[in-house]
Image (cartoon, grey):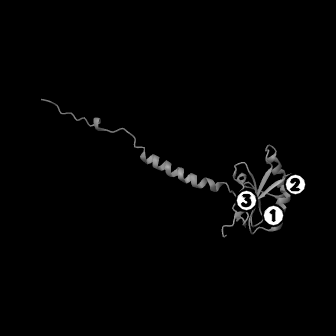
Amino acid sequence: MAMATRNEGGKVNSNINVTPMVDVMLVLLIIFMVITPMLGNKVNVDLPKADAAVVMEDANKEDAVVVAVTRDGRTFLGGDQVTVDDLGPKIVSLLENKTNKEVFMRADVRANYGKVMDAVDGIRAAGVSQLGLLTEKNEDK
């Protein structure tokens, strides 16, 4: 009498389906590509609009020194809030190893003019000769 054996182990597929993993990775890649440009502007300010705006590519570099003045008069160096008295020495320490001694300023359109000028004075006290005032290009025309 013959004995019937079942060979179910031979039918098992041990391959891993990587399609769902690739789908998730592509979605994450797209999300990071969209979010990354927004991380450059650490302080949200409404920039004034100008008709004769000139593109300043150096302002978008990772090591650019950017000073921001918000509408409530707070001053930021990069993403860190600083006082106007501390602004000059901190800029000096950031620029000491750089050949390009240029600082960029982002001031809110509704910021107090006196607070903006205090920040400009702090930047000038650091010995900066090139100060770029960042605006948005007026697209109405």
Q: Earlier in the sequence, mark 3 or mark 1?
A: 3
**Residue, disc 2:** 125
Give how far across and how far down residue 80 sits, in percent: 74, 55
Give how far across and how far down residue 109 sits, in percent: 74, 67
Rate crowding at label 1 as few (under 14), some (14 to 19) or many (20 or more) other CA atoms within 10 Å. Answer: many
Q: Residue furthest left?
A: 1
**Residue, disc 3:** 54
Q: Nearer the viewer, residue 67 or 86?
A: 67
Give how far across and how far down residue 102 sits, in percent: 79, 51
Amino acid type of the residue tagged 1 in the rendering = Val
Q: Would residue 27 appear left or right of 103 to someone viewing this image?
A: left
Amino acid type of the residue tagged 3 in the rendering = Val
The residue depicted at 63 percent of the width and 54 percent of the height is 37
Give how far across and how far down residue 51 sits, in percent: 72, 66
Determine which quarter of the picture holds residue 54: bottom right
**Residue, disc 1:** 116
The C terminus sits in image quarter: bottom right
The residue depicted at 83 percent of the width and 49 percent of the height is 92
Q: Residue furthest top?
A: 1
Q: Would residue 65 appear left or right of 12 to someone viewing this image?
A: right
The N terminus sits in image quarter: top left
Q: Nearer the viewer, residue 54 or 15?
A: 54
Q: Earlier in the sequence, mark 3 or mark 2?
A: 3
Query: How far apart are the two marked residues, 3 and 2, measured between alpha carbons?
Result: 26 Å
